[in-house]
Image: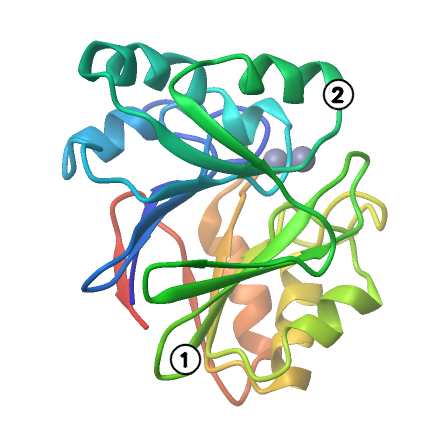
Amino acid sequence: MKLTILGNNGAYPRANGACSGYLLENDQTKVIMDLGAGTLSNLMSIDDASDLDGILLSHLHWDHISDLFVLQYLLEKRDQVVPVYLPESPENIYKMIADIKSFDVHPIHNGDEVTIKNMTFIFKQMRHPVEDYAIKAVDEKGKACLYTGDTGICDALTDFVEGVHTMLCDCTYVDNPDENKHLSAGQAAEIAEKAGVRHLILTHFNPELNPRDYAIVAERILRRGRVTKSEIMLTFNI
Ligand SMILES: [Zn+2]
Ligand SMILES: [Zn+2]
């Protein structure tokens, strides 16, 4: 599997930045997980989106979905329809997306497993003010990459991360997390260390803070694996 970071800010992008969005692909399957503000432009610099197998949305906050609404114009122009996997709430936002003809919508629920070509995606509900899912992508060899979406600390996440090779993790806070909404870098590293994660990729940074500060905290805690701060257009082989 190859993971490319299309954006790494939470809430709004820093100058020349972008919010959450990640391209995940292997020899057969190509999906995007979240498509926040600024990510479509970054995608277009490497991929014209003509053979996307799906768009998987962790939750329906704008910093994770806003570029969907401009992607529709490109898809319309090509008569292209892309499957979109997403939570059914908030209902008004779900309906806005479901009404777009270029999107073939598939509602997701806690524990759902979806196979797209030679990748399987498992969805587990996390702790956030709106319905929100972590997404675990598993390839044919059983290698797993988990994207947390946005989440506060919860047992569902600590259980879900067991056996995962790479964890792409919300760490909005360097420290002092808001338990109901987001993790801190320290919490992300503690979860990764306990589960034996080999590679922790930090993301969803506050645009006002320096990503290096997050990595310093996480590196002190994660002993058994390595820590990387996500950067736009950085790619990882998993
Ligand atoms: Zn967010
Ligand atoms: Zn959110």
Which of the marked residues, 2 or 1, is nearer the chain's N terminus?
A: 2
Q: Nearer the viewer, mark 2 or mark 1?
A: 2
Crowd rating for badge 2 (residues with CA inside 10 Å; few <14, some 14–19, many 20+): few
Position of residue 128 relative to residue 236, above or below, is above
Crowd rating for badge 1 (residues with CA inside 10 Å; few <14, some 14–19, many 20+): some
Q: Residue at x 46, y 82 (%)?
A: 198
Residue 109 as seen in the image, left or right of residue 226: right
Q: Judge by depth and name the residue closer to the eye, 11 or 125.
A: 125
State the residue position of label 2. Answer: 91
The part of the image, by quadrant, that contains residue 129 is top right
Residue 143 shows which numbered tag?
1
User: Percent position (x, y) of residue 99?
Assistant: 54, 12
Please report contact status of discs 2 and 1: CB closer than 8 Å, yes or no: no
Q: Residue at x 22, y 33 (%)?
A: 49
Q: Which element carries disc 2, helix, strand or loop?
A: helix
* Type of the residue with mark 2: Glu
Quadrant placement of the C terminus:
bottom left
